[in-house]
Every structure is written in structure tokens, then in C-alpha cells.
């Protein structure tokens, strides 16, 4: 069942378009994330659902009700704010009771519901404390209890874990999932942390420059990125400029460019039918590449390329190799299993073979922006493509 | 807590440290201590002594007498006390009601506007106090600017008699003391986390409810500080009632002046009145402080 429907929503601040005609449906009970770098419009979108901002265009439906023009206090939507925004002059108990006190419910009912909520977030014994005397994780729990007590249809979470340290963040992430299971309502989660979004979400919408670049389940976005941005922003990847040289039944031949006059040939399966001569981008995840000082014996369906190790980063669970192929820098993750090819550790400046299955290359129907191969992030900072209608509305504002 | 601990078991090192620190803090506070002793404690001691002497036409007779206090507590000065108290309360309330929205507006303005607005609040201080009051006197007088303009606009047919009334006193008092209310309010509201208001409306509070349940309680310290800064000088107001007020109903500040200025003089009564005023103000401050401390202690206690 559809719970939230966002239709053609835009928002501008002083002529700057923060959200650009976004349309999206979120299902009842779903844990949905907006993921993107800061300034991508994810928080603005959330604030429009909460009612703190009025959209420039479009409408927002909650169930069958159009809530676009409703003030925040009339929406059955509650928010967990980035810095919790607990009322410092009220105890934990009073913070949680706030929404019910506003409704002027009898105090016996308030009491039983507050206790129930505090129990859900395991804060029963902290009820009399003031927010400035409890820890960050505890504040987070109080914020959850406070937002859930009014039985909202949708809970909005604005970077709720950003202020916590790593261990606590991982712990709270699991707690949040448990609470989501326990209350069964729709959660809309905003974050810039891709691992957070990947681990918690049923579905993710990747955002950049006010647009939804791609939405889908985490594994779908990770394995099948629809654009260079999704591939780049979610996880790590190698983006290789390539040109189609031949098309077979179930694979294509590609010529990959590794500098002005250097190139290498690979094969790839495909999910869209390119044309011969078409320029596109290959995304290759670092963990899918094997690395060895000897050339692999099996050659069917395997791509291989020769390079030189430029850097070795020991990361505990795995080692990251930076391997130079022409002017491309391949990132390769290798787990520490010494049962495979080379038992002697690889060293700096060592020539190596990189190889991977041709179904692990992923084709993106976009020309590789210049500079991306050497790690320049600002290739994504190009201006937003605005529709004529939006341009007119912004001008007339 | 740690302080007590030190007193119970002072190690040699700690004692030495402590006495050194004590000496330092004494030295640092010496200038203000000397200042306060010379210009506050000693004058008040003189006033106390004078209040216990016998009046004479010009000076005092050095004869012990409690007549001044007897006069005060017999209710002879009840009316001026009452008038002063009422004036101070009305002034404080009006300053709060007028000053709060202004402080709020400034606190929520952009950085550029904040500075401009704050300077506008402070600019009147650059003009001499007495000149400002005289300006008001001219402005409010029967044939003054206000009445002339209103009559020229045909809004009134005859001049409004505001000058020499309590209303004139209140208008000028509020004008003079408003900045003392706005500035502490501003400094508290400016620090307020406005996402708390988002949180309140998110939880179902209307803007009005959010204001009364969140903004107002969180600006309590500014209200307290501003009210004290306005109330205390307003209680002893002399110049403003003297220059624009009704001369048939005198405030306590005027009474004190008259007892010293008009012959036969009565130094003991003037002194006793001053002391009673001081005690009233001290009591108000201490009560406020006590309530504040009690809240704090209760908060700490609840958090155990």
C-alpha cells in the first residue's frame, strides 16, 4: 500500500533550486532512505514532508490526503532531528509527554503511554533526568520515544546518528531497525552515510543536486548503478572510459582508454544494448578484481590487464591496492586469504595482473567526465538541468 | 563537594596551593573591594547613622532617636512607597511586553540587520539623559509637537493633557528603560536553538503553544535579568517624575529629595527611607536568587 506520494515537488531558496521536480512513492511500513552528499536536497525534501517548508511546485500525499498545505502540527508525521532538539527545560519524561500534553489527554493516559514508550527505547529509569545530563545515545532514544508517542503514520529521521561515534552508531542502527519492526510504520531516513543507508534501508533514493538519481533496494543500487554518480557515491568503484568495438549475442567487446595512446581490451555482459563506436563508462567494484603476480590460467569469460602496484593500504579486514594501468588508477580489494595464488606478499612497484569475470563489469550509458579517472570529485558539481516551467516559476518568484 | 573534601584532608601541597590561590584572588578583587567599601559601604554606614539621629532645621542633632523609623512604619510614607512600587511594576511589565517582540525580532534577523538594529537600540544612550527627558517634556506638553500635529491632522479638537500626569511618567520611564530590557532578552533569545520550535510544532503544538511552552520558558533568564535591570532603577525614580510627573502625588525618590532640600530639613527620615528602599530591593533580589537556586538544586536532586 502506498503511504507517501511525492508528486513533482520542487523547492528553491533565493533562486537556488534545492529540490527539482521530484516524484516518488514510499510504501506503507517501508524503511526508505534519501542518500546524497550535503546540499543534495535530501533534508529539504524531508522538511517539506514534515511541513517546515512549503514546496514551490507539486504536492505531497499522505495516504489519500493531500498534506502539501497543512502546517506541521496538523500532520500525522513526526520527526527525529539531527541534534535531537530535546527541550532542555523539561525532563526526559516531560519531553516524551509533550505531544500528549498538547493534546490535553488525561494524565493517567499520558503516564501509561509515556512509560510504554520509555520502555520501548529502554529509558524507563532515566525519566526524571534532564537532557543535558544524559549521553548522546540516550538523547537519541528519548527523541525516538518523543516522536513515536503520538502514533504517527510516518517517522522522519534527519541524519539521526550523525552526532554519535562509530560503535554507538552501529549499535543504534540495529536498535532503529528493531524499533521499526516493533512499530511497523513507515520510516523515512535521511543520511549522507552510504553504509548507514545500505544496512538499514528497504529502499534507497540516491540524490544529487535536487534530483533523485536512482532509487531501489540497496543491492540493486550497488550492483546495478544507473549512473556514474550512483556508482561513484555508493561504495567504491573504478570508473573506466571505454568505447564499444563489437557486439556479440551476450557480450560486448570494449576498448578501455588508459591515457593518450594507451588502451586495453575487455569483454563485458550488458544490460542495455549499446552501439558499436559508442563511448560509455565501465564501473568495476574493487572487491570483484583479483590481483596476482602470475597470469591467470583460465581465460574464458575473464578479463585481465597488467599494471604496477603504486600503493598498498592495509585495512585490517582487507588490503587495498592502488594499481597503475596507464594513467588509470585501479583500486583493488584483496582479502587476507593465503590459499589462493600468491603466498608471498605483493610489494610496491611490483608488476601484477588484475583479472575479473566479464559479468562483473557494469556498463553505464554515460561518457566518462574528464578528471574522474584521477579522482576529481567536482565533476558532479555541474549545474542542475531545470525544466522550462521551473525556470519560469523561479524567475517570477 | 570537592571543596569540602579538601577542607577535611588538606595535603601539604594542596594547602599551599589553596592559600596561594586565595592571596591571588584577594589581590585581584582588591580594587573593586576598596571601591565598594569607600563608595558604597561607608556611605551607607553614614546613612544608617544619620537615620538614627534627631532632625534639626538644617543639619542633625547628634542625639539617638528612632523617630524616623517610627514615622515610616506608622504608615506616613505608605502612599509614595505604593506609588513607586506600582510605577516600577507597570514600567517593568510594559518594558517586557514591548521589549520581548523587539528582542525576538532582532535575535531572528540576519547578522547584518542584527548589528544595525542593536545600534539603533543603543543610540539614545549617546544623548544626555536629562536632555532626552526635556525633549519628551516639550513633545508631550499641552502646546507641544504631539498635540500640534494631532490637531493639525484634525484627529483631536483640543490638546490632550498628558504632561504632569502619571501617564507621562510611565511613557518616559518605559522609553528610558526599554533598552535595559531588550538587551538581556536579546542575548538569551539569540542563543536559543530555533529547531526546538520546529520540534514543538512537529509534535502538534501550534505556533502560539510552541511560544508559551518552549520559547518563553527558555528565555526566563533574560526576562529575570531585564526585569531586575528595569525594576530597581524604576523604583527609585526621581528625575522623570520630577520633570514630567504630577506634583501632587510624589514618588519615594522625590520624597527623599524633598526631605533633604526643603527647610526644615529632615536628614534622618530621608536616610531611613533610603535604607528601607535598599532593604526592599535586596529582599526582592534575594527572593529571586533563592527561587532560582531552589530550582537548580531540585533539578540536580532529580537527576540523582
Image: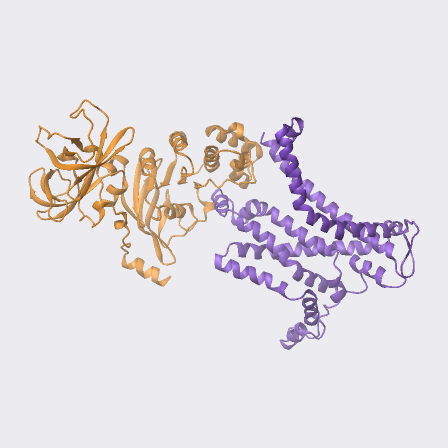
Chain colours: A orange, B purple
Front-most of A357 and B16? B16
Quarter assignment of residue A188: top left
Residue A189 horizontal/vertical position (percent): 37, 39
Q: Is residue A349 visible?
A: yes
Residue drawn at the location 17% of the way across and 49% of the way down: A367
Quarter assignment of residue A198: top left
Front-most of B59 and B204? B59
View extreme (bottom): residue: B152
View extreme (top): residue: A339
Residue drawn at the location 61% of the way across and 46% of the way down: B220
Quarter assignment of residue B83: bottom right
Q: Quadrant of the N terminus of chain A?
A: top left
Front-most of B60 and A139? B60
Q: Quadrant of the C terminus of chain A?
A: bottom left
Residue drawn at the location 35% of the way across and 56% of the way down: A16
Q: Is residue B88 left or right of residue B248?
A: left
Residue A48 horizontal/vertical position (percent): 39, 48
Q: Is residue A387 above or below residue B142?
A: above
Residue B38 horizontal/vertical position (percent): 76, 51
Residue A154 horizontal/vertical position (percent): 40, 39
Q: How many marks?
A: 0
Q: Is residue A233 above or below residue A297?
A: below
Q: Is residue B11 left or right of residue B286?
A: left
Residue drawn at the location 46% of the way across and 29% of the way down: A120
Q: Is residue B1 visible?
A: no
Amino acid at each position: 500500500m502506498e503511504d507517501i506520494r511525492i508528486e513533482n515537488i520542487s523547492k528553491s531558496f533565493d533562486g537556488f533550486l534545492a529540490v527539482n521536480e521530484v516524484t516518488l512513492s514510499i510504501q506503507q511500513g517501508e524503511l526508505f532512505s534519501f542518500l546524497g552528499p550535503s546540499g543534495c536536497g535530501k533534508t529539504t525534501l524531508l522538511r517539506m514532508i514534515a511541513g517546515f517548508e512549503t514546496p514551490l511546485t507539486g504536492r505531497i500525499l499522505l495516504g489519500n490526503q493531500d498534506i502539501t498545505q497543512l502546517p506541521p502540527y496538523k500532520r500525522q508525521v513526526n520527526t527525529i532531528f539531527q541534534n535531537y532538539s530535546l527541550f532542555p527545560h523539561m525532563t526526559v519524561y516531560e519531553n516524551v509527554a509533550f505531544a500528549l500534553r498538547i493534546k490535553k489527554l488525561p494524565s493517567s493516559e499520558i503516564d501509561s503511554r509515556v512509560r510504554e514508550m520509555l520502555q520501548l527505547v529502554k529509558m524507563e529509569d532515566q525519566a526524571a533526568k534532564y537532557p543535558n545530563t544524559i549521553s548522546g545515545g540516550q538523547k537519541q532514544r528519548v527523541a525516538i520515544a518523543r516522536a513515536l508517542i503520538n502514533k504517527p503514520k510516518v517517522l522522519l529521521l534527519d541524519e539521526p546518528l550523525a552526532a554519535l561515534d562509530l560503535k554507538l552508531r552501529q549499535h543504534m542502527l540495529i536498535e532503529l531497525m528493531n524499533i521499526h519492526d516493533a512499530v511497523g510504520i513507515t520510516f523515512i531516513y535521511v543520511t549522507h552515510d552510504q553504509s548507514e543507508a545500505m544496512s538499514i534501508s528497504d529502499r534507497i533514493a540516491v540524490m544529487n543536486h535536487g534530483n533523485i538519481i536512482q532509487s531501489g533496494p540497496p543491492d540493486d543500487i550497488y550492483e546495478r548503478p544507473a549512473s556514474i554518480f550512483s556508482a561513484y557515491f555508493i561504495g567504491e568503484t573504478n570508473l573506466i572510459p571505454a568505447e564499444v568495438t563489437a557486439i556479440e549475442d551476450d557480450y560486448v567487446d570494449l576498448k578501455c582508454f588508459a591515457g593518450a595512446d594507451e588502451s586495453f581490451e575487455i569483454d563485458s555482459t550488458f544490460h542495455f544494448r549499446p552501439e558499436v563506436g559508442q563511448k560509455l563508462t565501465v564501473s568495476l567494484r574493487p572487491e570483484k578484481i583479483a590481483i596476482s603476480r602470475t597470469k591467470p590460467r583460465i581465460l574464458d569469460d575473464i578479463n585481465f590487464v597488467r599494471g604496477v602496484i603504486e600503493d598498498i593500504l592495509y585495512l585490517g579486514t582487507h588490503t587495498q591496492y592502488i594499481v597503475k594501468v596507464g594513467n588509470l588508477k585501479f583500486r583493488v580489494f584483496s582479502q587476507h586469504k593465503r590459499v589462493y595464488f600468491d603466498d608471498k606478499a605483493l610489494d610496491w612497484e611490483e608488476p601484477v595482473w588484475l583479472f575479473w569475470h566479464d559479468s562483473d563489469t557494469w556498463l553505464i550509458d554515460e561518457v566518462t567526465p574528464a578528471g574522474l579517472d584521477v579522482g576529481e570529485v567536482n565533476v558532479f558539481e555541474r549545474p542542475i538541468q531545470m525544466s522550462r516551467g521551473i525556470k519560469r516559476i523561479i524567475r517570477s518568484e | 563537594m570537592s571543596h569540602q573534601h579538601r577542607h577535611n584532608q588538606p595535603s601539604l601541597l594542596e594547602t599551599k596551593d589553596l592559600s596561594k590561590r586565595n592571596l591571588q584572588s584577594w589581590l585581584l578583587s582588591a580594587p573593586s573591594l576598596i571601591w565598594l567599601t569607600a563608595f558604597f559601604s561607608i556611605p551607607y554606614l553614614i546613612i544608617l547613622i544619620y537615620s538614627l539621629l534627631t532632625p534639626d532645621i538644617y543639619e542633625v542633632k547628634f542625639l539617638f532617636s528612632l523617630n524616623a523609623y517610627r514615622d515610616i512604619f506608622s504608615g506616613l510614607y505608605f502612599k509614595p512607597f505604593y506609588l513607586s512600587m506600582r510605577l516600577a511594576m507597570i514600567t517593568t511589565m510594559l518594558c517586557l511586553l514591548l521589549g520581548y517582540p523587539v528582542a525576538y525580532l532582532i535575535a531572528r534577523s540576519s547578522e547584518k540587520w542584527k548589528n544595525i538594529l542593536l545600534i539603533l537600540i543603543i543610540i539614545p544612550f549617546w544623548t544626555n539623559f536629562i536632555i532626552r527627558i526635556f525633549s519628551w517634556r516639550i513633545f508631550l506638553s499641552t502646546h507641544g509637537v504631539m498635540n500640534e500635529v494631532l490637531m493639525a491632522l484634525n484627529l483631536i479638537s483640543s490638546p490632550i493633557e498628558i504632561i504632569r500626569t502619571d501617564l507621562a511618567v510611565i511613557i518616559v520611564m518605559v522609553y528610558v528603560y526599554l533598552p535595559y530590557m531588550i538587551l538581556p532578552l536579546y542575548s538569551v533569545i539569540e542563543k536559543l536553538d530555533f529547531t526546538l520550535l520546529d520540534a514543538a510544532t512537529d509534535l502538534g503544538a501550534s505556533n502560539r503553544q510552541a511560544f508559551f511552552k518552549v520559547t518563553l520558558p527558555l528565555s526566563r533568564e533574560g526576562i529575570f535579568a531585564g526585569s531586575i535591570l528595569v525594576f530597581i532603577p524604576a523604583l527609585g525614580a526621581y528625575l522623570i517624575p520630577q520633570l514630567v510627573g504630577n506634583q501632587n502625588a510624589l514618588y519615594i525618590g522625590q520624597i527623599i529629595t524633598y526631605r533633604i532640600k526643603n527647610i526644615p530639613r529632615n536628614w534622618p527620615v530621608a536616610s531611613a527611607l533610603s535604607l528601607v528602599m535598599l532593604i526592599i530591593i535586596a529582599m526582592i533580589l534575594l527572593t529571586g536568587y533563592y527561587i532560582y537556586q531552589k530550582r537548580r538544586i531540585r533539578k540536580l536532586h532529580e537527576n540523582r
